[in-house]
Image (spheres, grey):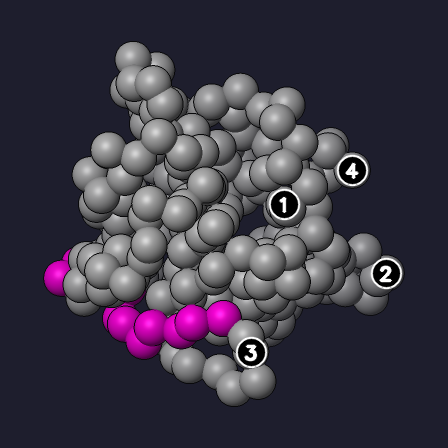
Amino acid sequence: MKVLIITGGSHGIGKAIAQKYTSEKYQVFSISRSIVSNVDYTQLQADLSNAAKAIDAIHSIFAVLDLKKTSSITLVHNAGRLGQINTLGNLDSEKIEEIIQLNTTTPLILSNEFIKLTKHLQCKKQVISISSGAAENAYPGWSVYCTSKAGLEMMTKTIASEQQKHIPGVKAIAIRPGVVDTNMQTHIRKTPESAFKHVQRFIDLKQNNELYSPQFVASQIYTIDNSNKLQNGDIIDLRTFV
């Protein structure tokens, strides 16, 4: 039995990943703040900006797994938000805390629980984080998002370093999916240029049909996952992978 646990599997890239892995006969669990209909994977509703609820959700998943029959188990950190688009000095400080909690702190907490809960397993174990080019490119107006994604990638590298001494250890990789046609992109395109000076670039990408579909991204992630060519700690950009 192959198992996939994903955060934010109710919309966008997360939903496409959950559907792709389900179609490949994985047992899939999604943890997200909303529940959607007409899907074939298990959904747990939880506010992932609340650490206690996130921990409860992952423990409830492990409580129903038949770990003796598990040959592969993967945690995908997909849930995340862009938050307010504006320069520092013009943001709501409580919103900053909320985005960092969701985008960086919760993945750290869930990774911590995942590694604890799989410590005794001898199967394939991995953590895949959905990152962004914003992890290394400083976009004015995206200070919180850029910071949160940079933290996510450093978490990936650190897990890889820590797990080298364990056999089998947890493999950690991060994937930058490129610019994907999701609600986040709609939000970006509606931002006034005074708050985000690069907004026209994203408008042009949409008008020129240069956005990846969530389904394409999900298929590429599945291919990467099953290629067995990646080193622990790798940061992959789908735009160069394709």
Quarter location, residue 122:
top left
Disc 3 secondary structure class:
loop
Magenta-span inclusion, residue 102? no
| First to last magenta residue range | 41-52
Residue pointed to by mark 2: 208
* Element type where label 1 sits in the image: helix
Q: Is residue 152 above or below residue 54?
A: above
**x%, y% of residue 185?**
61, 65
Which residue lies at the image location 22% right of the left edge and 60% below the top edge? 63
Question: Of callouts 1 and 4, which one flags the residue occurring earlier in the amino acid sequence?
Answer: 1
Q: Establish if 138 lies above or below 49.
A: above
Mark 2 and mark 3 lie on one chain; the one further toward the N terminus is: 3
In x, y percent, where is residue 137?
A: 53, 36
Q: Which residue bears the numbered disc 1?
A: 221
Front position in the image: 242 or 83 = 242
Q: Earlier in the sequence, mark 2 or mark 4?
A: 2
Foreground mark, 3 or 1?
A: 3
Q: Which residue is mark 4?
A: 242
State if disc 3 and disc 4 touch (CB < 8 Å): no
